[in-house]
Image (tube, rainbow, N blue to C red):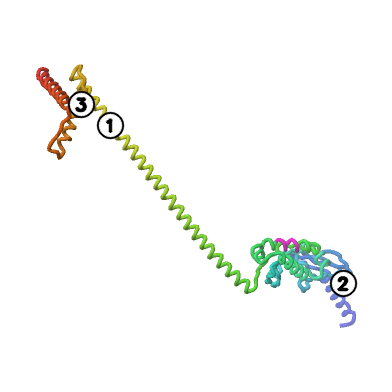
Amino acid sequence: MDLGTLIIVGLVIFVLVTAAKGIQIVQQATVKVVERLGKFHMMAQSGINFVWPYIDSVRPFTLLGRQVNYVDLRERVIDFPPQAVITRDNVTMDVDTVVYFQITDPMKAVYEIVDLGAAIHQLMVTTLRNVMGELTLDETLTSRETVNTKLRNVLDEATDKWGVKVNRVELKNIEPPKEIQDAMAKQMKAERERRAVVTEAEGTKRSAVLNAEGEREAAIARAEGQRRSTILEAEGMAEARLKIAQAEAEALNRVRGALGESSPANYLIALKYLESLEKIADGQATKIFLPFEASSILSSVGGIREMLRGEDTAGPAQK
């Protein structure tokens, strides 16, 4: 092969290599920062991009000490190792954090900060210590959402000039010292025992109250039943007496009709007197003293006998 052929082949190879260098293929959701002679020239978007070889170059992007020739626009997550923090009540504990962020301005992320990941890490450590230093141990364990919100606001404001949007900050784990954990376990046990005693006492109290209410309602029901029974008994007695009075009145009316113009009072008095004599005769005494008025009463009885005899005489005549 002569010299001319070698030159032609070399030129062809050079042209092909130069053409290959002039084509930049960018993946979806990524961009490349293109510089021309060391100065920002353009932002290569997803797809095929053409640049001038040997004049244009891609600026590398550094994240956590690793350099790449593109900027990823997707949301990223950084899991930071445990950091020692001190609370307001002087308790030292280890806290694990996770940060979710997204690059919104690739140009700022490349030119405003040397290592974006390292900067976020250091900012996260200092902010975490400041926030935890304002809280007590109990507050850090019960106010995770508050801590997450404070951390996110501080990080989002500080990283805005780097073209970064901090979406979420999460406390993955909070690990107090071993002696603090033992004390917390004892405290929780004592609290559970106290709640059990209080619950049992409240149950006993409630049971006593319900029993008292039940006895009171039973007493009220019994009193109401006795009242109703007494009322019904009194009404029954009153009705019975009324019936008896009506019957006696009917009997007196019939006696009056049988005696004509005579008053039936003598008949009624004699009848009651005879009933009294019957009761007196039933006693254990061998001698019975009759009152002086017995003669008049007996005369009334005689009148009754005459009346009844008259009725018997009138009876066959009417028949």
- Mark 2 neighbour density, 10 Å: few (under 14) some (14–19) many (20 or more): few
Residues tagged 3 and 2 counted as in contact (Cβ below 8 A) = no
Give the residue pinned by disc 1. Answer: 241
- Residue bearing mark 3: 269
Real-space Cα separation, disc 1 to disc 2, in angstroms = 135 Å
Q: Secondary structure at mark 1?
A: helix
The part of the image, by quadrant, that contains residue 136 is bottom right
Figure quadrant of the N terminus: bottom right
Front-lying residue, 239 or 299: 299
User: Gap between marks 3 and 2, in whole Å?
Assistant: 154 Å
Which dot, 3 or 2, sits closer to the camera?
Answer: 3
Q: Which secondary structure, mark 3?
A: helix
| Precedes in sequence: disc 3 or disc 1 | 1
Q: Amino acid at mark 2?
A: Tyr
Report helix, strand or loop for mark 2. loop
Q: Are marks 1 and 2 in contact (CB under 8 Å)?
A: no
Amino acid at pointer 1: Arg
Please report the residue visible at 83 percent of the width from the left and 71 percent of the height from the top: 21
